Amino acid sequence: MIGMLGLGSMGGAMARRMLAQGLEVVGYDPGAAACARLAEAGGVVAAGAQEVADRADIVLACLPSKAASLDCAEAALQGTALELYVEMSTLGRAPLLALDEMFRAAGKGFVDCPISGGPKAADIGGLTAIVSGRPEEIARLETVFAALMGNRFVVGDTPGMAQVCKLVNNILSVTAMVTTCEAISMGVKAGLDAKTMIDVINVSTGRNSATLDKFPKAILPRTFDYGGPLSVGEKDVELYLELARDTGMPAFIGANVANLFHHLTAQLGETVDYARIITVWEAWGGITVGGEK
């Protein structure tokens, strides 16, 4: 049986995907609605993280904050069945090194495995796994990878290395998103059609993850249902700046993106869908991006 800690937009989608692929899943989330969705899909709902680790030898964690991740890890460590703990959250390098040390001291395996792709990729088993850890422990995850991942990359044999790679990816992704919001809004204000611009860009040199995925699927149709909250983007930018401080590397662009995200969160709130950030530029310009002409 596979354990799943965190049944939100990502963890819940992964749990349901594993169930659909024939794996047995026991999960926990403090939200009653998330637990109900797991039960409806055929999963077992546990009363807490320790109970998940009492039932499952492999436990996956996909949680929204560093505090939640550390609390669940400490509780799962007390589980009687736990053999291998897999941290799929984006927490940064230092917390992963501390978690690895904690699980090693208790005689448990630990793998650093942040994921990329979003909830819709999780629904179809198309996630990307960025993995670091001991080869023999990574090998135990083949069944999980087969159910959830379209791509997997082992970037090192030490937990924390995958976190660095994920943060590099994420700063590129969020920078592309805010830059695309600004640029497309500029074009709309100047009289261009948003969809036409996206079509042009996607066969030109400006294409990126926002123009290829987020704009066509969640912004132009005005559904604003990309699936992740704005708070996750803000958290990832802050973790990138922590990495910059730790390594002594400058992060001029990252710092500006962080300031912008603070403003966006103040305007919209932490829980709104990530795609709604376009509405801030719309308000600034008195425009609408997408929708019916």
Image (cartoon, helix red, strand yellow):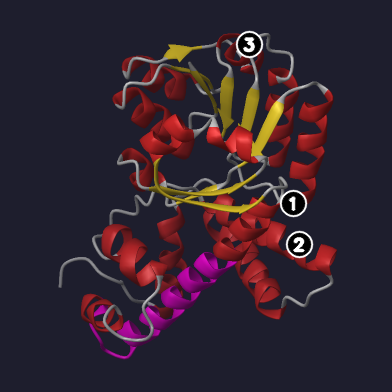
Q: Is there CB contact under 8 Å for labels 2 and 1?
A: yes
Say whether disc 3 or disc 2 marks the residue closer to the N-terminus. 3
Q: Which residue is located at x 48 percent, y 29 percent?
A: 7
Tell me residue 12's x, y (percent): 43, 31
Q: Are marks 1 and 3 in contact (CB under 8 Å)?
A: no
Looking at the image, residue 119 sits to the left or right of residue 153; the answer is left
| Label number found at residue 243 | 2
Residue marked by disc 3:
81
Q: Position of residue 102 (x, y in %)?
A: 81, 30
Near mark 1 (Cα within 10 A), the count class, few <14, some 14-19 or many ≥20, is: many
Tag 1 residue: 93
Per the rendered image, the range of residues in magenta is: 171-194
Residue that appears at 83% across and 63% down: 246
Give the percent coordinates (x, y) of residue 159.
71, 45
- Labels 2 and 1: the sequence-earlier one: 1
User: What whole-number distance in Å separates the C-alpha atoms at marks 2 and 1?
Assistant: 8 Å
User: Is 58 located above or below residue 209 in the figure?
Assistant: above
From the top left corner, tell me how far across and down residue 84 is, in percent.
63, 25
Q: Is residue 140 above or below residue 25?
A: below
C-alpha span from label 1 to label 3: 27 Å
Kindly report the distance in space between the C-alpha atoms of the residues bearing marks 3 and 2. Answer: 34 Å
What's the magenta bit mostly, secondary-structure-wise? helix
- What secondary structure is marked by label 1? helix
Horizontal arrangement in the rendering, residue 99 relative to residue 57 (left or right):
right
Secondary-structure class at tag 2:
helix
